[in-house]
Amino acid sequence: MDNIVTGHALGKKLLRVLEGKRETIPPVWLMRQAGRYLPEYRSTRERAGGFLNLCFNPVLAAEVTLQPVRRFNFDAAILFSDILVVPLALGRKVEFLVGEGPKLEPLDAAGIAAVRETVDANVLAPIYETVRRVKSELDDKTALIGFCGAPWTVATYMVAGEATPDQAPARLLAYRDPEAFERLIDRIVQASIKYLVGQFKAGAEVVQIFDTWAGVLGPEQFERWCIAPTQKIVEGVRRQVPAAKIIGFPRGAGAMALPYVEMTGVSAVGIDWTFERSIARDALQPRVPVQGNIDPLALLAGSAALDREVDDVMKELGDGPLIINLGHGILPETPIANVERMLKRVRG
Ligand code: CP3
């Protein structure tokens, strides 16, 4: 499987950076680049009949994956799907209510025993089909990124059943019944390994592990619920895809980003916009390429605030291997002209 990852590497900026090279003009893509800030996304979602129908419709999901690449010529496409398809494949109910976000059946310690031990492959099959379709449409400069949620972040939604401000329900369950919680985490780890290997086999060249809620964990909990499961996924995927390029995004990790990089074995690390850039340069970049970290609100604000933010990322991190991105997903209210402005600032 080595050839999948390295075959076209030289033509693709993102893959060169993931090999540890510095690019004079760094590669750029944006988390959540396929989404509601694009009118063409909103109309395709309507045609699909809702968000989950869009995720499981390979023709339309491939279409929205490609929309931002066509419009902005990003250096990578990211598979259009969601991290919560893994709980679906583990037999949980998942819905997306318009304007409210995800709703799942909440889980307690007793409920964890009823979670499937392995994924239902039929649920994930259409997503691999999306990957194949996108891959066949991409040119030889644009990389294809697949993804999954990190076990901790996926578990927070499975336990609470919805987004909460600080993921207290999952943190409480992890304190009260760590054995049960570990069983849940292990199931998500195994499911994620299968899911990511499936994406690589279908044509993904890189995958990102989104740990959106890593930052609510104290250091000891961070090691147990963020680092250890991520490390198992990295190892499990590389057992089947030895050269797999894996970007870890432990949002809010702060000082824990260094042990995260050292212990998980990720190929690159995404940092959020609160991360001090000179520390990322001195402590992280000598070990792995760094991805980030423009504040999504600076992108929304635009004008001089955006220019300053872009210039600062380039100044602090541009002398090493850097992937320009946001510090979290693009906000739906973001003007398209601001994305164009950002790209011009990066690419000259
Ligand atoms: O990046 C991309 O363009 C690829 C697609 C993608 C989506 N979700 C599409 C989506 C990716 C990579 C994700 C990841 C994801 N999903 C994360 C991790 C990254 C992050 O942003 O923190 C999380 C926590 C989820 C779970 C999720 N999905 C939530 C909490 C919500 C509701 C909040 C929101 O932004 O609406 C979603 C919905 C969702 N996922 C949308 C999109 C485009 C919006 C739904 C819609 O179009 O109606």
Image (cartoon, rainbow, N blue to C red):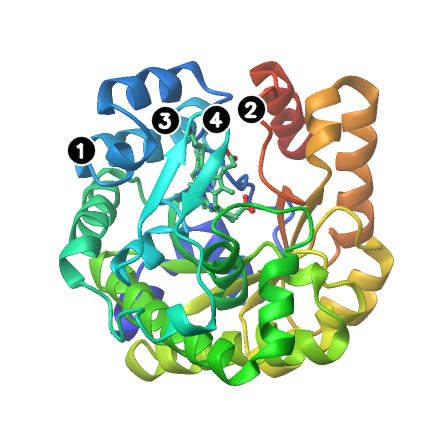
Q: Name the spot of residue 214 as percent of width and height, x first.
A: 64, 62
Of circles 4 and 2, which is in front?
2
Q: Looking at this view, is 31 or 340 the one in front?
A: 31
Looking at this view, name the residue that lies furthest to the front.
Answer: 110
In three-dimensional space, the C-alpha distance between marks 1 and 2, rounded to whole angstroms, equals 23 Å
Residues 224 and 11: in front is 224
Q: Image point 19% across, 42% down: which residue? A: 133
Calculate the distance from the C-alpha at mark 4 to the C-alpha at mark 2: 16 Å
Q: Residue at x 58, y 33 (%)?
A: 330
Q: Which residue is mark 3?
A: 67
Q: Which dot marks residue 332?
A: 2
Q: Which residue is mark 1?
A: 59
Image quadrant containing the N terminus: bottom left
Q: Is residue 80 visible?
A: no
Q: Which residue is mark 4?
A: 72
Q: Nearer the viewer, residue 339 or 6?
A: 339
Asked whether mark 2 and ligand 1 are closer than 8 Å, the reply comes as yes
Amino acid type of disc 3? Gln
